[in-house]
Image: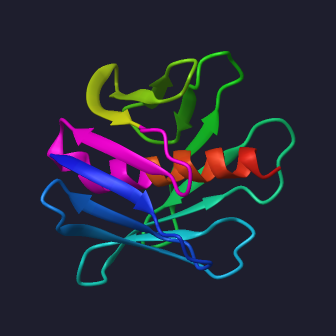
Amino acid sequence: MDLIIKNRFTPAGGSYVRNLSGEDVYKVKGRWLSFTRKKFVMTMDGKLLFMVRNKYWRIFRHSAMIYDPNGNLVAKAMRKISMADDYIVSGYQPELSVVGQVMNYNYQILCGGRLVAKIFRPITFVNDVYELTILDDSMASLLVALVIAVDNIADQMRHS
């Protein structure tokens, strides 16, 4: 499954999640003036799947949390301190990791060491766009939430 995740150019935030035919697949809604960049990943009929938000206070690393509809922490994504653009994802079993390159335009998402998705980030000047190739469809909504978390961390790093 191939998806395009594109940030909306509105103050409230949110993102478009569409397949290659241009059809909406998931809704991602943001909050107006959210200090933690809170976003909600939902089905097209409005059922909440995940809530993603940045950590309010940070000491060394930028991070974002992914919560299930009941408010339980599913995973925490943190930017690794390294030259490559890698992310540590803790809390989810089997272990997830986001492995990037130094120029941070290509990523691989591994689950228990197995490749489950690829992310390509084309160069844009107005708003962020991610092309997500999902190799394990059973993880699709979680992988969309993880891309939103990575984007939240990148935004936080650019604006801090």
In the displayed structure image, the side of residue 143 where residue 64 appears, left or right: right
From what the image shows, is residue 50 above or below residue 150?
A: below
In the displayed structure image, the side of residue 156 where residue 150 appears, left or right: left
In the displayed structure image, the side of residue 142 where residue 126 appears, left or right: right
Q: Place residue 18 in its image quadrant.
A: bottom left
Estimate the x, y position of residue 12 in percent, counting from the top left. Answer: 59, 79
Judge by depth and name the residue closer to the eye, 65 or 13. 13
Magenta residue check for 35: no
From what the image shows, is residue 82 above or below residue 50?
A: above
Q: Residue at x 30, y 53 (%)?
A: 4
Estimate the x, y position of residue 14 in percent, counting from the top left. Answer: 49, 71
Q: Residue at x 49, y 23 (%)?
A: 100
Picture colour scheme: rainbow
Q: Place residue 48 in its image quadrant.
A: bottom left
Which stretch is magenta? Answer: 121-145
Toward the right, the furthest residue is 59
Toward the front, the furthest residue is 125
Q: Residue at x 78, y 52 (%)?
A: 159
Judge by depth and name the residue closer to the eye, 69 or 143. 143
Judge by depth and name the residue closer to the eye, 68 or 97. 97
Magenta residue check for 135: yes
From what the image shows, is residue 129 above or below residue 83?
A: below
Q: Residue at x 42, y 55 (%)?
A: 145
Q: Tag count in the figure?
A: 0
Estimate the x, y position of residue 151 in percent, counting from the top left. Answer: 54, 49
